Amino acid sequence: MAGGGGVVKGSERDDTPVLITEAAPSYEEQFAARKRKYMIMMGLRLPCLLLAGVFHETWWLALGFVALSVPLPWIAVLIANDRPPRKSERVNRYQRDKTAIEPAERHVIDG
């Protein structure tokens, strides 16, 4: 046989999944990713406040950590409520060939 449909041996088989669509992640996956981002950003607020307490003698450093921790909840909520951007879809439209119909020569008879 020359390369016909033979039996695939176990060692030759590729078990990696094949991507068959460009579908967006499910709502549950998107929600889990947004929730994870929110928890990380809110988790960063506590270390900032603790570091501000540790460096209370260096006022400018403590103030910097406090200033960094103030907008974190607002930013975390904005990121958590934002969905991923939509993919641009290319619409497949029929494009006619402009030279398909050639103008016919017409003779005008003046009377």
Image (cartoon, helix red, strand yellow):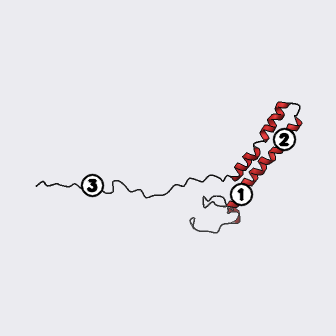
User: Residue at the spot x=69%, y=53% of the render?
Assistant: 81
Q: Which residue is mark 2?
A: 49
Q: Position of residue 32 (x, y in %)?
A: 73, 57
Q: What amino acid type is highlighted by mark number 3?
A: Pro
What residue occupies the far left of the structure in this picture?
111
Mark-to-mark CA distance, 3 and 2: 78 Å
Q: What amino acid type is highlighted by mark number 1?
A: Phe
Q: Position of residue 79 (x, y in %)?
A: 70, 49
Please state, as top left, top right, bottom left or bottom right, where the N terminus lies in the image. bottom right
Q: Which residue is mark 3?
A: 103
Q: Quadrant of residue 101?
A: bottom left
* Label 2 vs 1, first from the N-terminus: 1
Q: Which residue is mark 1?
A: 31
Tag 1: Cα neighbours inside 10 Å, few (<14), some, or many (≥20)? some
Q: Nearer the viewer, mark 2 or mark 1?
A: 2
Front residue of 98/42: it is 42
The answer to whether residue 53 is above or below residue 102 is: above
The answer to whether residue 87 is above or below residue 47 is: below
Q: Quadrant of residue 9?
A: bottom right
Q: Disc 3 on helix, strand or loop?
A: loop
Q: Position of residue 25 (x, y in %)?
A: 66, 58
Mark-to-mark CA distance, 2 and 1: 28 Å
* Label 3 vs 1, first from the N-terminus: 1
1 left or right of 51? left
Please state, as top left, top right, bottom left or bottom right, where the C terminus lies in the image. bottom left
Tag 3: Cα neighbours inside 10 Å, few (<14), some, or many (≥20)? few
User: Residue at the spot x=43%, y=58% of the render?
Assistant: 94
Tag 2: Cα neighbours inside 10 Å, few (<14), some, or many (≥20)? some
Front residue of 82/71: it is 71
The answer to whether residue 52 is above or below residue 84 is: above
